[in-house]
Image (spheres, rainbow, N blue to C red):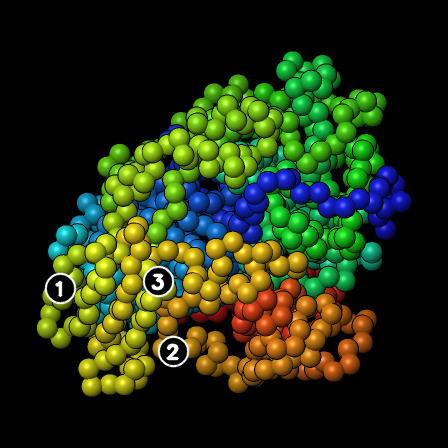
């Protein structure tokens, strides 16, 4: 059992940094696989560095996959796989939008869940590709940018260019050639190649992950836990994960390096192949002389969409902490179960609550620890790590530069804080610098790809503020990311942002229209401008599937007769705005979800004629128009929820009154939600995805037990064997 009595605590009210709040995204990407030579360019600088596993990926970051190389990035439950000679920019990565710029190369995107209102878009030099539902998609762009090819293995996609669009269904592919007067061809897809088989095998590995019994599929890094450790039930902690093999003297946050990121500031990048989920979610505990990772507090159900944290540690020290290191030192200790994490960046009180609700039982108060030794992990050997400020500021490997720190030095140290008092240098953005702080050379993409124009349907966000323009303010902030007010001031001083976006992105709604190469191909309807600007606004965008000689939705996979009819209103930018017409201009934070009262997750810009295949084949899905209120879920009357009759409970707990209990061979963990009155939420049939909405939103759910809050089942001490791999399907 953990020694919680050792914590010196004082109850206080949650404190939020004053001023305008702009919560960072809860969802990030993880660069989890690198085969060969891969380079990474963080937002805010033009320098490239060798990519390293476990690097977070967010808005403005870029990836270059060199010759004979491959890479993989997970964003929530979605996987993006990049082939050789691929240049890809992450234009927008947040809780609602995943938008990328493919200047050259190949990307296969497996989207397991696309909630209503979410936008998944890949922009190429010839067309903007919008995913209309979950599925597997392959998008390719030729080296000269003259042709793009889109393959839909499963799902459906819209291809838009030059003011018109058409739809691709399952097992179809299309090629779009040219930019000013593009033409297109469309046909049924044949057998997949070696690349497709590799992607399918990666998918199977993730689908069969045993760790999905204990964490959400929306938590990046779950897919690597099975091979690196096992799950056990630890009294007082619940289900915990135990790493199988760790180096001598290992402790969490000891072997890796710090990088400076756009929204979160100092962010940990671990060296271990499995080192993502356990360092950005949950808490670490030292039990029975071993480290264990607790993703959720005991008794807390699996949270469908956990919130990313840059590093769940407390810091002490800085430039003026003298422990015999020139320039000062900074130290940190991993947070233990029930220890609150308060972000150093400006966030709302709802964000702080939702960030801690998974691992802290008493979320209405804050533990005010004034001495680092009083953190429960501070007494564990090697748990407190110290490094020179200059080494952290330049993103150097901590294991190479760590310095010893005595208990007496910790007692005499300044009070702990959640902000590292270290001003970043430009080297810290790329990270993984040499021991001396010198930059590391990386393979560079051809310069023509950096400025190659692509076609976009959705408006790209403003370019990240250059790091050079931030440096003076970051020095003033002493290791805290820029506030929204500071960002606004810098953007006002920079007039080149709009022209820079216009030079790279061209609205897909403008042009002479797509021309079919064959008479029997799909007929497209040209966008009819309703204003002088000629730009798309999604509020009035309606997609209808109309076919020659067939009623809407009557055609099966492989048909070439789909027509997309678009009705557009227009915005001054020329792009579809990413905000929903259901959202108020300034939403009031919901006390549980942080979303505005009356906010909605319904976006009318895309309407899919066919329901997802998972729902078509699930006979257990039904609608509960007025579900019974449940205290742990936050459902209230008048909310609409799709659920099933299956509930999962802890083996030692009784089924709640009124809940259903239909045991299954492999229990699906319950998904915790926080939904307001009349809210909407989606939970997938696998039970690992949900969207929390504010009052006045709508909801749909899959096959999880929506009226149970019991934790997942206890694991055995030894991991269960992997199921027999399924044969590779032929595409």
Sequence-wise, which precedes: disc 1 or disc 3? 1
Instruction: Determine crowd level at label 1: few under 14, some 14-19, many 20+ residues with C-alpha closer than 10 A.
Output: many
Q: Is residue 640 above or below residue 230?
A: below
Disc ID at residue 610: 2
Badges 1 and 2: C-beta atoms under 8 Å apart?
Answer: no
Sequence-wise, which precedes: disc 3 or disc 2? 3
Quadrant of the drawing holding the C terminus:
bottom left
Q: Position of residue 688 (x, y in %)?
A: 58, 65
Secondary structure beneath label 2:
loop
Label 3 and label 2: CA atoms lie apart by 21 Å
Q: Nearer the viewer, residue 223 or 316?
A: 316
Q: In terms of image quadrants, where is residue 44? A: top left
Secondary structure beneath label 1:
strand
Q: Residue at x 72, y 16 (%)?
A: 322
Secondary structure beneath label 3:
strand
Q: In terms of image quadrants, where is residue 236? A: bottom right
Residue pointed to by mark 1: 515
Q: Position of residue 440 (x, y in %)?
A: 44, 26
Residue pointed to by mark 3: 538
Is 329 placed left or right of 185 in the picture? right
Q: Is residue 376 above or below residue 389?
A: below
Q: Position of residue 257 (x, y in %)?
A: 58, 32
């Amino acid at each position: 059992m953990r020694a919680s009595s050792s914590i010196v605590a004082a109850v206080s009210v949650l404190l939020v940094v004053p001023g305008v709040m702009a919560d960072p995204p809860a969802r990030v990407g993880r660069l989890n696989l690198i085969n060969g030579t891969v380079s990474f360019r963080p937002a805010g600088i033009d320098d490239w560095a060798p990519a390293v596993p476990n690097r977070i990926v967010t808005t403005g970051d870029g990836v270059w996959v060199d010759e004979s190389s491959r890479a993989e990035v997970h964003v929530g439950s979605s996987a993006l796989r990049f082939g050789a000679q691929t240049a890809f920019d992450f234009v927008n990565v947040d809780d609602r939008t995943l938008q990328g710029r493919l200047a050259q190369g190949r990307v296969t995107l497996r989207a397991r869940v696309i909630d209503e209102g979410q936008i998944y878009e890949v922009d190429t030099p010839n067309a903007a590709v919008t995913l209309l539902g979950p599925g597997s998609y392959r998008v390719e762009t030729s080296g000269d940018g003259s042709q793009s090819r889109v393959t839909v293995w499963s799902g459906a996609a819209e291809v838009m260019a030059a003011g018109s669009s058409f739809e691709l269904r399952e097992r179809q592919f299309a090629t779009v050639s040219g930019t000013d007067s593009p033409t297109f061809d469309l046909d049924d897809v044949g057998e997949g190649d070696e690349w497709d088989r590799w992607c399918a095998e990666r998918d199977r590995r993730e689908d069969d992950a045993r760790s999905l019994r204990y964490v959400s599929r929306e938590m990046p890094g779950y897919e690597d836990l099975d091979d690196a450790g096992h799950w056990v039930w630890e009294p007082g902690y619940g289900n915990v994960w135990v790493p199988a093999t760790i180096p001598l003297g290992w402790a969490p946050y000891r072997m890796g390096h710090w990088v400076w990121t756009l929204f979160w500031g100092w962010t940990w990048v671990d060296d271990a192949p499995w080192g993502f989920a356990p360092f950005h979610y949950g808490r670490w505990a030292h039990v029975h002389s071993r480290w264990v990772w607790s993703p959720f507090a005991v008794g807390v159900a699996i949270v469908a969409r956990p919130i990313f944290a840059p590093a769940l540690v407390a810091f002490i020290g800085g430039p003026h902490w003298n422990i015999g290191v020139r320039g000062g030192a900074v130290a940190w200790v991993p947070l233990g179960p029930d220890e609150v994490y308060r972000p150093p960046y400006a966030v709302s009180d709802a964000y702080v609550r939702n960030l801690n609700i998974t691992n802290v039982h008493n979320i209405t108060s804050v533990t005010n620890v004034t001495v680092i030794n009083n953190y429960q992990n501070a007494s564990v050997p090697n748990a407190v790590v110290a490094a020179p400020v200059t080494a952290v500021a330049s993103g150097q490997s901590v294991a190479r530069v760590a310095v010893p720190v005595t208990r007496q030095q910790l007692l005499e140290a300044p009070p702990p804080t959640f902000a590292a008092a270290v001003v970043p240098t430009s080297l810290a953005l790329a990270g993984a610098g040499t021991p001396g702080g010198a930059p590391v050379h990386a393979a560079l993409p051809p310069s023509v790809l950096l400025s190659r124009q692509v076609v976009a349907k959705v408006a790209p966000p403003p370019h990240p503020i250059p790091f050079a323009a931030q440096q003076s303010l970051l020095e003033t902030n002493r290791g805290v990311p820029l506030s929204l007010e500071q960002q606004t001031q810098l953007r006002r001083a920079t007039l080149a942002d709009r022209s820079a976006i216009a030079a790279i992105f061209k609205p897909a709604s403008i042009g002479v229209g797509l021309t079919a190469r064959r008479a029997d191909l799909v007929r497209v309807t040209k966008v009819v401008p309703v204003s002088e600007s000629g730009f798309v606004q999604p509020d009035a965008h309606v997609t209808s599937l109309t076919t020659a000689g067939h009623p809407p939705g009557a055609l099966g996979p492989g048909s070439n007769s789909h027509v997309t009819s678009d009705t557009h209103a227009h915005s001054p930018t020329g792009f579809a705005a990413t905000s929903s017409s259901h959202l108020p201009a300034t939403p009031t934070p919901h006390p549980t979800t942080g979303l505005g009262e009356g906010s909605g997750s319904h976006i009318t810009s895309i309407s899919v004629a066919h329901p997802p295949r998972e729902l078509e084949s699930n006979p257990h899905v039904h609608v509960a128009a007025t579900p019974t209120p449940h205290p742990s879920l936050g459902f209230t009357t008048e909310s609409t929820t799709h659920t099933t009759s299956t509930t999962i409970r802890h083996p030692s707990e009784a089924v709640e009154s009124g809940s259903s209990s239909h045991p299954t061979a492999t229990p699906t963990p319950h998904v915790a939600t926080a939904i307001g009155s009349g809210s909407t939420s989606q939970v997938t049939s696998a039970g690992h995805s949900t969207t929390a909405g504010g009052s006045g939103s709508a909801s749909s759910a899959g096959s999880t037990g929506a009226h149970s809050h019991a934790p997942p089942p206890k694991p055995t001490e030894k991991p269960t064997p992997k199921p027999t791999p399924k044969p590779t399907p032929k595409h």
